[in-house]
Image (cartoon, rainbow, N blue to C red):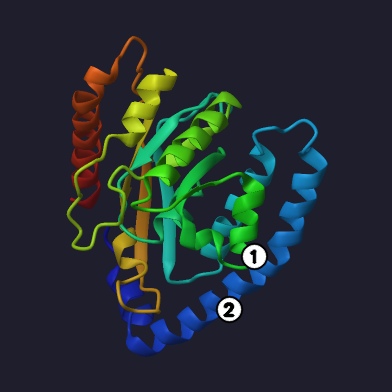
Amino acid sequence: MRVSAFRQRVLGNAFSRTLLSVWAWLMLGVIAIIWTPLVFVVWVVTAPFDRGRYWPGWLFRKLCVVHTWLNPLWRFRTSGIKVEDPRRPYVVVANHESLADMFLISHLPWEMKWLSKEDFFRYPLIGWMMRMSGDIKLIRGDRQSIVSAMRGARDRLSKKVSVMLFPEGTRSMDGVMGEFKDGAFRLAVETGRPILPLAVAGTRQAIPKGDWRFDVTTAEVRVLPTIDTTGMTKEDVPALRERVRDLISNEVALMKA
């Protein structure tokens, strides 16, 4: 995704990046402090009828949207197909470029539960909101945790809430999309839920690896057509996995062209 020469010149120098990054991190903390009691109230009020914790999660994602509005270094946009029924549960999959992916994808107007590594759940405020929102904890390399996470994903789908997974397992370190793992596709086949692919482009520059500062970025998430899994079996998982990876990879290349 291209950044205009004017924005790069004005905001991309070391002084501007440092100053605006301090502002953005400060605003993230302030928003989290404000948002936590709001999410708690919604969680308590909706608990009797919202078994899937749809509304606490929906409000929690808006934290990312508000933070992006207040961060002059970032410009995010969404495109692609429109999801007509936000309560039809999908297995949502996307390529993973950086930590900024969650800020970008949260701009999509429907709620989904994220499969996230255990570390995020330990953070004060953010971790508390993730728990209230019903996000799913995963300990990498722990087989029992993987089994538990997949059980949690099936539970959210059964309550008419989509789940969000990164099939690469971890963010790309060099900008090249990694191989997709089977888990998300096995989940979709076993539950009979459609797959909703997302193509993410531009976030790798938003939070450069090894630097606490944000950078000038224009990023986009594009919603691709759904893929029906009705009638598929576990033997179809490898072909489905590669089909989705090719779709996302080709779309990302077009977005970056």
Residue at 32% in and 29% down: 185
Quadrant containing the N terminus is bottom left
Q: Reading the chain from its start, which is encountered first: label 2 or label 1?
A: 2
Question: Camera-side residue: 167 or 217?
Answer: 167
Name the kind of residue labelled 1 in the image: Leu
Position of 37 with respect to 164 (left or right) is right
Which of the 4 image quadrants contains residue 240?
A: top left
Label 1: which secondary element: loop
Q: Is residue 203 shown to the viewer in this render?
A: yes
Of the pair 189 and 254, the residue shown nearer to us: 189
**237 w.r.t. 253: above or below:** above
The image quarter in which residue 158 lies:
top right
| Residue receiving disc 2 | 26
Rendered image: mark on residue 34: none
| Residue under pointer 1 | 125
Q: Is residue 51 above or below residue 169?
A: above
- What x and y, as percent, mark residue 72? 48, 71
Residue 161: quadrant of the picture: top right
- Kindly identify the amino acid type of the residue bearing the numbered disc 2: Leu
For disc 2, the neighbor class at 10 Å (few under 14, some 14 to 19, many from 20) is few
The residue positioned 23% from the left and 63% from the top of the image is: 173
Q: Is residue 138 above or below residue 225?
A: below
Q: Is residue 198 above or below residue 220?
A: above
Q: Which secondary structure, mark 2?
A: helix
Q: CA distance from mark 2 to mark 1?
A: 14 Å
Report x, y in % for residue 113.
Answer: 53, 41
